[in-house]
Image: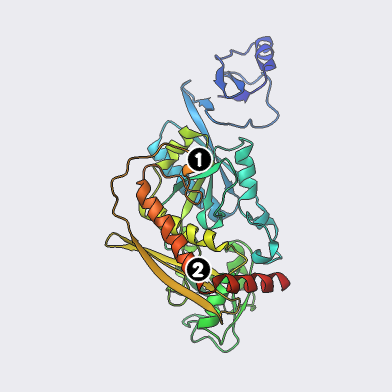
Amino acid sequence: FHDVVTSPEAHSLARGSGERVCPPISWTSCTLWVFCSGNSGPKPKQSYVMSEGSSSADGNGKVSRVIRIGTRKSQLARIQTDSVAAKLKELYPDVHLEIVAMSTTGDKILDTALSKIGEKSLFTKELENALERNEVDLVVHSLKDLPTSLPAGFTIGAVLRRENPHDAVVLHPKNAGKTLDSLPENSVVGTSSLRRAAQLKRRFPHLEFKDIRGNLNTRLKKLDEKEDFAAIILAAAGLKRMGWEDRISAVLQPEDCMYAVGQGALAVEVRAKDLDILEMVSVLHDPDTVLRCIAERAFLKRLEGGCSVPVAVHTYIKDSQLYLTGAVYSLDGSESLKETMQTSICSGGSSAEEVDERLQRVGVTATKIPADLQDGAERLGVDLADLLLTKGAKEILTVARQLNDAR
């Protein structure tokens, strides 16, 4: 089709211009008039916003649904979003997908450490605003960017199969062949994460750690083109998705550095009331990843943690058991608490749930995964957090937050 406009006046304008007007397609609160031929008719001033139930006509006059996907503008975000779109297109070939990219607060403020900005939704707020205004139908996030409590009316409709969640060491070219252990005394390592810095200060006390901001491209450029950093620490998943695995000097194992809650997993956020969209994206859920991430997010939520305090996790599934290791650290890594708990993930055969916003577990709606398994994963996270709280985790995190605010 050539143009789509949403004003009722378009019909009379089209008749006056001699255009052939297709029958209107009703959606939500508007009527779409599709101008099927010719270029002389009225043009909309800007692309119209597709919303729930919107449709378009292809070159053969066939009407197909249009789904608009919101994403950040960075190259990595686009790669991640394109991968989700490709999966949806494979599953629903008749659906037309449009990508809507935008900048977020976290993308715009590049001269301040993430932990100092004081905003819980640094990389998600603008995307959620677009979702609320019906400018997009779903949003693709890195799950680790999503707070454990979502704004009212939103839910995570899909958590995709997790990529490698561990952190990776990327060395300056002049340090090729070295390791963090073998770097010279007082070498500077860049990281934007309090969690990474706290653990690595503890493990590699001969190194210094300084903040480095920007997307992956920017941080690698800062590393390669200047002498400020001997190495930087990045998420292995992002490097792999960008096709830069050859830059990984080492992948940090849990004994050296546990990862962030949700790291390596992609999440699809939708409006909780849009049951058809929720149903559409739910097939993307990876059950093991969902259970691991529910446990991790429940742990973080119970601790009232976020990017302003050092909280780390490690999860895995073996022999129908879900294992969760969680830890909290002081900013310099000198104090820490770390414990491991497990729970069975053998389902008792509970029936599928009705879609209901109240059935979210730490923001996740996964009606096709047995409810008892999700409940068990959530309890695991809460129980582990409670164990650490009884041992003084709140005091460690309170001091860490106060010191970070004072820096």
Image quadrant in which you'd find residue 9: top right
Say whether residue 361 is visible: yes
Give the SS element for disc 2: strand
Mark 2 crowd level (few <14, some 14–19, many ≥20, 10 Å Cα): many
Q: Position of residue 318 (x, y in %)?
A: 30, 63
Give the SS element for disc 1: helix
In this view, the residue in front, 104 or 96, is 104
Q: Residue at position x 51%, y 64% from top?
A: 260
Say whether residue 162 is visible: no
* Three-letter code, disc 1: Glu
Residue to which mark 2 is pinned: 312
Q: Quadrant of the C terminus?
A: bottom right
Label placed on residue 114: none
Residue to which mark 1 is pinned: 357
In this view, the residue in front, 169 or 317, is 317
Mark 1 crowd level (few <14, some 14–19, many ≥20, 10 Å Cα): some
Q: Position of residue 225 (x, y in %)?
A: 63, 73
* Three-letter code, disc 2: Ala
Q: Position of residue 168 (x, y in %)?
A: 48, 71
